[in-house]
Image (cartoon, rainbow, N blue to C red):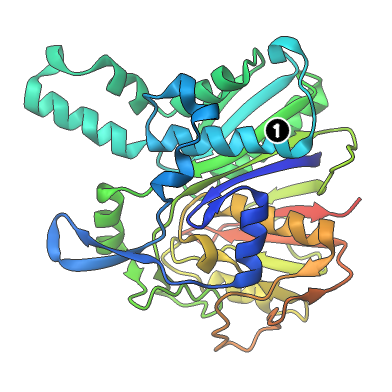
Amino acid sequence: MNVAGIGVVFTRGRGIDSYEEALRQGWVPPCRVELSSAPDISLPVYYVAQETITDKAVLRRIRRADRFSKMAVLAAWDAVQDSGIVLEEKGSSLGIIVATAFGPHATTFRFLDDILDYGHANVSPTIFSHSVHNAAASYIAYVLGTRGPTLTLSQFAFSFHQAIILAESWLNEGRCDYVLVGGVDECHTVMEYICSQKLAIADDGKIKPFHFSASPSAVPGEGSVFFLATRTNTPKTYCEISGLFLYGDGIEEAPDMYIFDADGMAGDERGYKDAAATSVMIAGYSPVFGSMMTGSAFHCAAGALMLKHQIRYACPVQDNSCGVNLCAVTESAEIKKIWCVRINCVHEKASIRLKLE
């Protein structure tokens, strides 16, 4: 399955070029917000700026969409534009798969608040329609004018991985010629509160992916990444997704480079230390976009860029207490294979394998 185009919406801008620039630039401090439940407590958060998701040319037909859907739509739109592929009329050859951990929870809680305030008979049907997880996928299909299969997958740690498996199945079965597959999650007051109560927040704003700690630090983030996948080679092909292994199978094979998803969301990252016990170079770019369950999509985008341009990006935060073989310098390099590894809260491992064709 080849990656023909990538679209990104994240804390430092929009588009694959903005993401590449952020990888080159490295870490920048997140903004700080006061918790609505505790005004005396501030939290570092990697928010997507409002001006990043106000493209009137793309969003003019979905003005009522919430932030969650707008981030997904813009990333999906940009993935198609980045590929240079002109979709056939009516777009029946394009499938859409959206992966998310928590869905549009800001709108969901707004809908529940309205029920409490106004009763079942007086809540907004628009807010209700936006509160369901599949709203973003529907908006993507509407904006692109597609008529192919559309699905939303919701799972905590491995939702993006399950979406990749499904996308490959659709392509192999011939259900569609192209699949837009990506992840999206947002940060809101409810998520801020949950993170402040359940996670060890990095007060200095720095996620430290290589501490492999039992209580790792996290900085909540939000954003969206989409990939246009196809079985055929295209002029702008980044790389091939050559395999995906869930729950540990196949991770032992050594690539040229590992990218660890360690971002504080698992609650216990000691499992990464086992995968790090190797001479293979290791990287982690969570400090660029923040802690989120769908962060694997961002790391796959980083891996695709490195394979396409044959360059390694220096880790943005290089605290290396375990002495792993860390990617410390941005430099040209010969890279053929990159494995993106994620470990969930019960130490189950998943690996997305990227390969240069």
Q: How many marks?
A: 1
Q: Residue at x 36, y 49 (%)?
A: 187
Near mark 1 (Cα within 10 A), the count class, few <14, some 14-19 or many ≥20, is many
Is residue 238 depicted above or below 169 in this figure? below
The answer to whether 117 appears left or right of 235 in the picture is left
Instruction: Find numbered disc 1 in the image and state the secondary structure of the residue it sits on.
Output: helix
Residue placed most toward the observer, 44 or 248: 44
Where residue 200 appears, as percent x and y from the top left, is 33, 71
Residue 21, position as x, y percentages in the image: 64, 63
Residue 264 placement (x, y as % from top left): 44, 66
Residue at 55%, 78% in the rendered image: 317
Residue 88 vertical position relative to residue 190 in the rendered view, above or below: above
Q: Residue furthest front?
A: 57
The reply to whether residue 254 is visible in this rendering is no
Left or right for 114, reference 310:
left
Q: Determine the image quadrant of residue 324.
A: bottom right
Frontmost residue, 314 versus 109: 314
Task: Judge whether residue 119 can be spotted in this image.
Answer: yes
Q: Residue at x 44, y 75 (%)?
A: 206
Where is the N terminus found, in terms of image quarters?
A: top right
Type of amino acid at the residue the image marks with label 1: Val
Which quarter of the figure has residue 168? top right
Q: Residue at x 84, y 73 (%)?
A: 332
Q: Is residue 214 above or below residue 260?
A: below
Judging by the rendered image, the residue that carries numbered circle 1 is 80
Residue 329 drawn at (x, y percent) = 71, 81
